[in-house]
Amino acid sequence: MAKLIEIVGLGAGELEQLPLGVYRKLMKATIVFLRTKEHPVVPSLQEEGMNFVSFDAVYEKHGQFEDVYQEIVQTLLERSQSSDIVYAVPGHPLVAERTVQLLIEEAPKQGIEIKIGGGQSFIDALFASIKIDPVEGFQLLDGTSIHSEQLQMDQHIIISQVYDQFVASDVKLALMERYPDDYPVAIITAAGSENEIIQQVPLYELDRNMSVNNLTSVYVPPVKEEAVLWKNFAKFREIIAILRGPNGCPWDKKQTHESLKKYLIEETYEVIDAIDSGDLDHLVEELGDVLLQVMLHAQIGEDEGFFTIDDVIEGISAKMIRRHPHVFGEGKADSAEEVVQNWQEIKRQEKGGEMPDSILAGISLSLPNLLRAFELQKKAAKVGFDWQEIGPALEKVREELQEFIAELDGTEAGLTRAKQEFGDLLFAFVNVARFLNINPEEALFATNEKFIRRFRYIEEKVKRSGKTFDDYTLEELDRFWDEAKFSGL
């Protein structure tokens, strides 16, 4: 004969709100297992003659809620082996009840039938208490496992299972990542009962001297102020769509993938500048500018019907999971070097396992040429086409410099050959940079910025003198340069 666990809900409030069928089931049962007796209807049912045992003591044994739920479920499964049992939970069995979900998952494996009875959900009582219409859109979240990424700020949000001030603190911190510190929220306890309490507080006071228990939920109203929504990715996407829309900005509407290329390059270098400066506020701004470029390209793709930002995100998410099996799968990588090796092997397999026509394939022509030379040399070095120490690389620089100087004979043919030797000299210098783990592009960028700072110093000195550059000799200007240099510019 099949074993049975019948699960019923105690509703959200008083005895009078309990469905008649649930009441009869509770009264008829020899013994009722309660997840918790801390519910406003339990004293009344006890007076009516209900016999029960509760699992409240289990909560005291464990530091994690999941451990509590696992023990409750295992106890119920064991007891059901000898007789059918009735298990009662607050509210409705299928709303915010982790033990019920675990029972639904585990019971069939042991040949135990699960039957779900009725019960009024606490959500119904909450809707009535805060007077909202769920058709406007709402989220029901678990306070014990809330993350800021879950929050749909333009919807009504109900956060259940705010058992104590520790959970309330976690909820507050998650909300404060997205909402202003003084955003108004409501703390609702025992909704729908005669003991109902609703407290309106600013967000920062959510865990301060508030009376919370297992009947407490937090209500967060939808955001109406546009500026508060600016942290939302969906809002940013909407802004870009408006800019590219029929009534949008003429400049944004005329852009193409081709016309935007130069801006992406410029914004990328400005990010590097912000990193080098150590100015985090500036870095935030410049990363935003790069993200703008990504979103504009994605919006163009959507406008033309080829792809959307969702396709971009899906593609990179799938790639990151595929190429990090040591994180998301069964792979192993104990060092950054092993990660790179695995990455390259997975990349090769994704392309059908075929070897490229050349070891140097895949290095973009669009890279700045200093950086492209750096990448070409790295590729060649991987197969042993490289010196083992820096000495020969330095000697190659001297050799190329001599060859370059030798071609400067003042003739047209010499100038043509000098141009080739100049490229060889730069390439040799890049090789030296590689041996020293110096990124040549970053090094030249830093030098350019240094030149700008020192030349502006010279400009300021000339301006303060009331003269022009024509009034100064090169030696005099060079002294200003030295001043800038020794001042740390």
Image (cartoon, rainbow, N blue to C red):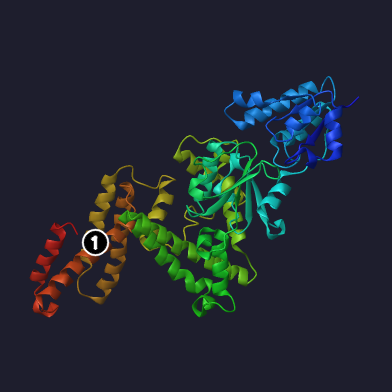
Residue type at tag 1? Lys
In-image side of 357 versus 311 (left or right): left
In-image side of 7 versus 469 (left or right): right
Q: Seen from this angle, which residue lies furthest right? A: 1
Q: Which of 352 and 163 is in front in this view?
A: 163
In-image side of 235 versus 440 (left or right): right
Q: Could you tell me residue 110's position as x and y percent? A: 80, 26
In-image side of 148 versus 109 (left or right): left
Q: What count of labels does the image hold?
A: 1
Q: Nearer the viewer, residue 165 or 137?
A: 165
The residue at the point 57 percent across, 72 percent down is 242
Q: Which of 198 and 323 is in front in this view?
A: 198
Q: In which quarter of the image is the N terminus?
A: top right
The residue at the point 45 percent across, 37 percent down is 335
Mark 1 secondary-structure assignment: helix
| Residue at the spot of label 1 | 450
Quadrant assignment, res 306:
bottom right
The residue at the point 52 percent across, 45 percent down is 206
Q: Is residue 423 above or below residue 212?
A: below
